[in-house]
Amino acid sequence: MRWEANVVAMEPERLFAFEWCPYEHDDYRDFASARKTRVEFKLEPTKKGTKLVITESGFSKIPDEKRRVDALRSNTQGWDIQAKNIAQYVES
């Protein structure tokens, strides 16, 4: 599967953000002109260590309502899975 993203922010030990097209992965789609969402990984210090906050925004820019709802639902489930994978990795 073709996957493209543009890194839009990187602050060591604090923030990593990228934009990507979160729907209809098609190898022939022009991703440069497609509507994108922004994914941010933020690290925040806590008394017990570090908190990871994963946020994806920009779904309202996706013009087709069905595509927007499908992307939001799919990505919410996907980030839940990835957060568990990250937690397992950190704990091991």
Image (cartoon, rainbow, N blue to C red):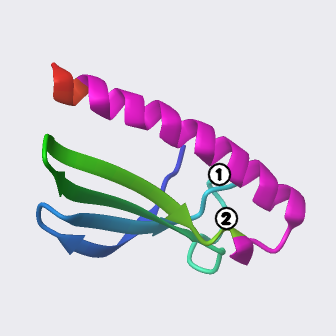
**Is residue 72 something one can see in this rendering?**
yes
Q: Position of residue 46 (x, y in %)?
A: 17, 51
Residue at numbered disc 2? 29
Magenta-drawn stretch contains 73: yes
Q: Secondary structure at mark 1?
A: loop
Which sits in the foreground, 19 or 81? 81
Residue for point 50% across, 42% down: 79
- Asked if marks 2 and 1 touch (Cβ < 8 Å), the reply is yes
- Relative to 77, 15 lies left or right: left
Q: Which residue is mark 1?
A: 25
**Element class at badge 2:** loop
Instruction: Compare residues 13 and 10 and report the one nearer the observer.
Output: 13
Q: Residue at x 77, y 61 (%)?
A: 68
Question: Dot 2: few (<14), some (14–19), or many (≥20) neighbours within 10 Å?
Answer: few
**Is residue 55 within the magenta segment?**
no
Give the amino acid type for the residue marked by disc 2 in the picture: Arg
Q: Which of the labelled discs sits on residue 87, or is there none?
A: none
